[in-house]
Image (cartoon, helix red, strand yellow):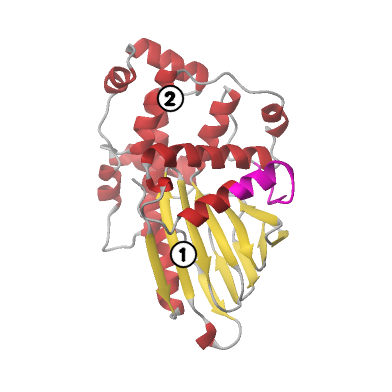
Amino acid sequence: MPALKSYASGSVDESREVVKEHFYAIAMDVHGPAERFAFGMDVVRFGPLTMADLRFGAEIGLEIDRMPTYHMDLPLAGHAVTRQGGIEVVVSPEHANLYRPEAGPVDVPGISADCRLLSTKIEPAGLEAELEGLLGHPVRAPLRISRGFDLTGGPGRSLARLVRLVGAELHDDGGLIHHPLVAGRLWHGILTGLLLAADHPYRDELAGGAAPSRPRHVKRAIDVMEADPGLPVTVQDLARISGVGVRALQEGFRRNVGVSPMAYLRRLRLARAHEELRAASRGQATVASVASRWGFVHLGRFAAAYRRTYGVSPATTLDR
């Protein structure tokens, strides 16, 4: 079940550590009197999304050396100027921003003092799997998705309403968004809404008509894997849970997901291991302990798969 965490601090150093724990390592500068800085964050993780309600209390600037995930910023108030890959986007309640994992460092030279951001980190495996499921065939990743999109009409306006609903419910520990039966539907809805609102190479195909729905047994297996990717399961276990034979499950994944059930699970595990390595530091974790926790028993194969996916070794991520 998604668990809410809340933070408040007047210290820039403490705030950087909190952001690093849940999002990324950042450099942060306060523009103007330091005493005006008043960081606040309410954050929850559900499925492949980490969503936070962020406030700073003063005008600030941010720099992120490496953005390993997709990331969407949707302001409730105020504005921010953001740059990535040579493209500048002004983020406001009328215009959202999306960062891409392959597009390089992020520079945010100005976040207004009154800015309140609903900030959503999106694991690449989650967004790409959502698109593959909607289309019914594999896609080329990472997605070349647009940096910004309009929130004043069409799918963008509907997505903004959905994200703001979740943001409003973040603070209610007893709210329905914290129930796993509701949380799953919400994060799937947010990902689908983003894919319909933002421009990318598959948008016309996606808008042209609904792809065949994934069979129930495929959906059931995916739900089990995404709920706890570290769970020690075999394809036989997944078939039994899904109520079909192994061959039927494998064929269902081949037709509807584009990869085998175990390949899908490895992709999820790799994303979670990457997230943990990025957030940890030497002394808190080792590459071997993280790999083991997410079901990788052969360290050399884990390191090779990690390098193919993220372009660096797991040890390099941990050192950063």
Quarter of the picture holding the N terminus? top left
Nearer the observer, 261 or 103: 261
Nearer the observer, 184 or 70: 184
Question: In the image, residue 293 lies at what x, y percent?
Answer: 26, 44
Say whether residue 99 is left or right of residue 40. right
Question: In the image, residue 109 lies at what x, y percent?
Answer: 65, 71
Residue linked to disc 2: 219
Above/below status of 13 relative to 284 = below
> Magenta stretch: residue 87 in it?
no
Give the residue type at disc 1: Ala
Question: In the image, residue 57 lies at what x, y percent?
Answer: 55, 77
Q: Which image quarter: residue 315?
A: bottom left
Say whether residue 269 is left or right of residue 100. left
Q: Secondary structure at mark 2?
A: helix
Identify the residue shown where x is 61% and y is 69%.
115
Q: Is residue 315 visible?
A: no
Nearer the observer, 316 or 78: 78
Give the residue type at disc 2: Lys
Q: Is residue 244 visible?
A: yes
Q: How crowded is the residue under tag 2: few (<14 C-alpha within 10 Å), some, or many (20+)?
A: some
Q: How crowded is the residue under tag 1: few (<14 C-alpha within 10 Å), some, or many (20+)?
A: many
Q: Which image quarter: residue 252?
A: top left
Above/below status of 126 relative to 98 = above
